[in-house]
């Protein structure tokens, strides 16, 4: 952010999203740790966990894109 201050909002968004993803994962873990019946896990927790995984993958891709852009610019590329 020091070198590319206009990226600060995106970095802040990614930090907030990471925190949100972590809290959501803790919630899902808690639901699984309560020894719920398999039917409950299959019908409710599994789809929520799939959505979480997709969001986490998108988040990671955004982080990687940002890092690659910063690397390109730091090495003299056009970003």
Image (tube, rainbow, N blue to C red):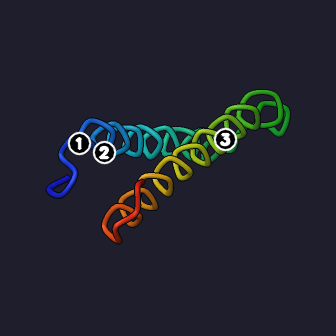
Q: Nearer the viewer, residue 6 or 41?
A: 6
Look at 42% across and 56% down and name the residue there: 69
Spot occupied by residue 34 in the image (x, y as percentages of width and height): 61, 42
**Label 3, on which residue?**
54
Mark sitting earlier along the chain (2/3): 2
SS of the residue at dot 1? Answer: helix
* Total numbered badges shown on the rendered structure: 3
**Label 2, on which residue?**
11
Look at 68% across and 32% down and name the residue there: 48
Cβ–Cβ below 8 Å for labels 2 and 1? yes
Q: Nearer the viewer, residue 72 or 21?
A: 72
Would you say 14 lies left or right of 45 here?
left
Of circles 1 and 3, the one toward us is: 1
Q: Is residue 44 above or below residue 57?
A: above
Look at 33% across and 39% down and name the residue there: 10
**Label 1, on which residue?**
8
SS of the residue at dot 3? Answer: helix
Spot occupied by residue 65 in the image (x, y as percentages of width and height): 50, 53
Would you say 36 lies left or right of 74 here?
right
Spot occupied by residue 35 in the image (x, y as percentages of width and height): 68, 44
SS of the residue at dot 2? Answer: helix
Look at 81% across and 28% down and name the residue there: 43
| CA distance separating discs 2 and 1 | 5 Å
């Amino acid at each position: 952010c020091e070198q590319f201050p206009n990226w600060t909002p995106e970095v802040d968004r990614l930090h907030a999203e990471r925190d949100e993803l972590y809290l959501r994962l803790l919630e899902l873990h808690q639901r699984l740790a309560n020894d719920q019946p398999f039917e409950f896990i299959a019908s409710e927790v599994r789809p929520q966990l799939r959505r979480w995984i997709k969001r986490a993958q998108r988040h990671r891709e955004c982080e990687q894109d940002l890092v690659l852009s910063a690397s390109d610019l730091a090495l003299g590329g056009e970003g």
